[in-house]
Image (cartoon, helix red, strand yellow):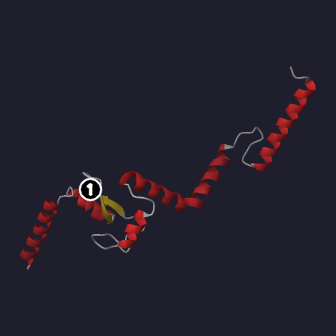
Amino acid sequence: MPTKAEYQRKRELILAQKREAYRKDPMRTRYGHRDPATVEKYKRDWYRQNKERILAQKTSRDHGRRYGLKPGEYDARLAAQNGVCAICAKPSPIKYRLAVDHCHATGFTRGILCVRCNAGLGAFDDSVYLLLKAVAYLAASLEKLA
């Protein structure tokens, strides 16, 4: 059983450690807990300062998990396409990145497309037959105009 003097020494040591921790970490309150409002402000500021890095990591991780792309493979494919959609050859609108086009049956990634072209292929169920019928339909309507 510790003596009263040993107890006091141990207590002073613990209190000194807590004071030092508070001095090093200004977000700690005097009770040793983090102030929730201060922590939220810190997190918001940190996110604003690191937003581009966070989004790049998230996108890279998502491409790897969903499409099996290795880190940097999306950027390499996009560079091979000169930074534009593989179908319409337009760059991505500022708000969106270009999408990874893939076959839903096999999981094979075909290329990088803009959101509109990717949705268009999806609307035709990735069917070459339906796309050819759509082309024939448009060609026939152009002939009627001429």
Instruction: Point out the image quarter for the N terminus.
Output: top right
Most foreground residue, 53 or 73:
73
Question: What residue is at 42 percent from the left and 58 percent from the top?
Answer: 70
| Residue type pointed to by label 1 | Cys
Question: What residue is at 45 percent from the left and 58 percent from the top?
Answer: 60
- Find the residue positioned furthest to the top: 1
> Number of labelled discs?
1
- Find the residue positioned furthest to the bottom: 146
> How far across and down, in percent of the image, does residue 73 sit?
41, 63
Is residue 31 toward the left or the right of residue 105 in the image?
right
Question: What residue is at 11 percent from the left and 75 percent from the top?
Answer: 142
Residue 98 vertical placement versus 104 (above, below): below
- Find the residue positioned furthest to the right: 5
Q: Is residue 134 visible?
A: yes
- Find the residue positioned furthest to the left: 144
Residue 88 vertical placement versus 108 (above, below): below
Residue 36 vertical placement versus 66 (above, below): above
Question: What residue is at 38 percent from the left and 54 percent from the top?
Answer: 68
Q: Quadrant of residue 51?
A: bottom right
Q: Which residue is denoted by mark 1 in the rendering?
A: 103
Q: Is residue 95 visible?
A: no
> In what element is the residue under mark 1?
loop
Q: Residues within 10 Å of mark 1 (few under 14, many from 20)?
A: few
> How far across and down, in percent of the image, does residue 32 sit?
75, 39
Instruction: Point out the image quarter for the C terminus.
Output: bottom left
Most foreground residue, 68 or 86:
68
Q: Quadrant of residue 116?
A: bottom left
> How far across and down, in percent of the image, does residue 40 sit?
62, 48
